Image (cartoon, rainbow, N blue to C red):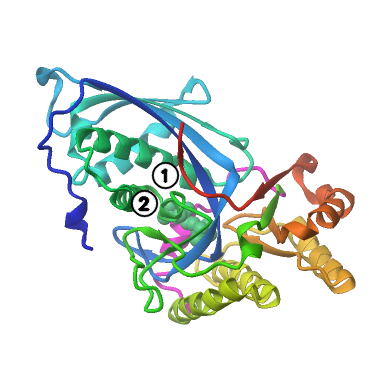
Amino acid sequence: MNTSAFINTITHTLPQKATYTWQTPSNIALVKYWGKSNPQIPKNTSISFTLNNCHTITTIEFIKKAPEEIKDQNIDFELYFEGKKKDEFKPKITEFFKRILTYCPYILEYNMTIRSKNSFPHSSGIASSASGMSAIAVCLMSLEKEINPNLSTDFFNKKASFLARLGSGSACRSIEGPIVIWGKHPKIKESSDLYGVKFPYKIHPIFEEYQDTILLVDKGEKQVSSTVGHNLMHEHPYAENRFIQANQNIENIITILEKGDIKAFINLVESEALTLHAMMLTSNPYFILIKPNTLKIINTIWAYRQEKNSNICFTLDAGANVHVLYPKNEKEEVEKLITDKLSKYCEKNHYICDNVGFGAKQL
Ligand code: DP6
């Protein structure tokens, strides 16, 4: 499928007024997306668990403009975040709308009011772009479905993911669940650089109930944004090998997820997390996002795993927070480890309990 399939040509009558509300989740990558080319095309395939509790709820109200109000390429919207008008968030969303204009020309015909809130605190160091951008994308798709009721669910999800990707790469993995793949890969026929697809193979039941407790080591804004980090992969001395390794890890994780091979899962996922941060350490300019407490947590997890023969492991996103991953049947012991030994490394002892989820929901 090429991008032209996603171009909407307005052939149906547009409604005067419409309102849609969607809840879309965050996701945590197991094989990381780090490095991209224009427009938001990943350098390697990535795969993620869709989360359940960390989500954004967004309502968009569309009110049709009078013909004289429709001026050349003017995108008109107001943005409220957690009940307050947030003009400082507007440039990012304006940029997103501009990128998707070819595919959703109808947005020029509306005054839009976007109201958004997150289930997790805004300053928690958890990236809200995946859930935030995917929520806007599905609201637009609801309008598109109203304009054209014949749209299939498959097309709805693909285009929602396609649009979300243009807002933030990882957002394209936040439409469906429990496991989503983004980026063309020879072992996954349906895969695409343009949108995320549901993991098409059998998933061992253990991974459908996986737990993710997010330890909030640092709730502040990141010093280096993901976008800057991705760009540093362009001149990076290890980039080409990294992309090859990630694609190999995708091939390996297919079998791991099917068979329920937790030991191999732990090795692959932790290696991916540390490689992501190794890429940051070896960029130029170089940078470090992990903090001393991130390392303390990792060492405590390793010691505990060794001592108890547990299946606990960790992954990291582009920040200092640690995602602790474990099977549901170890929940009680791991929760005890977290309260006894790990929460003290979190800012204000804060952490978020989450688990694998099933994707976007219309409310
Ligand atoms: C480390 O999706 O935030 O979380 O496309 O520039 O918006 P942009 O970047 P973003 O990058 C996410 C990077 C990551 C790994 C991942 O989620 O795969």
187 left or right of 286 in image: left
Identify the secondary structure beneath mark 2. helix
Q: Which mark is residue 161?
A: 2
Q: Does the residue labelled 2 lie within 8 Å of ligand 1?
A: no
Point 46% across, 50% down: residue: 174
Tell me: residue 4, above or below residue 248.
Answer: above
- Secondary structure predominantly adopted by residues drawn in magenta: loop
User: Disc 1 marks which amino acid?
Assistant: Ser
For the N terminus, the quadrant is bottom left
Can residue 322 be seen? no
* Residue 157 % position (x, y): 35, 50
Q: Is residue 280 magenta?
A: no
Residue 303, image quadrant = bottom right
* Residue 19 % position (x, y): 34, 24
- From the image, tell me which residue sits under label 1: 134
Is the C-beta separation of discs 1 and 2 under 8 Å? yes
- Name the N-terminal-most of marks 1 and 2: 1
Taking depth in this image into account, of 167 and 289 the one nearest to the observer is 167
Mark 2 Cα within 10 Å, few/some/many (few <14, many 20+)?
many
190 left or right of 269 in image: left
User: Disc 2 marks which amino acid?
Assistant: Ser
Mark 1 Cα within 10 Å, few/some/many (few <14, many 20+)?
many
Tell me: residue 315, above or below residue 124.
Answer: below
Residue 35, image quadrant = bottom left
* Residue 179 % position (x, y): 51, 60
Per the rendered image, the range of residues in magenta is: 217-238
Tell me: residue 88, above or below residue 248.
Answer: above
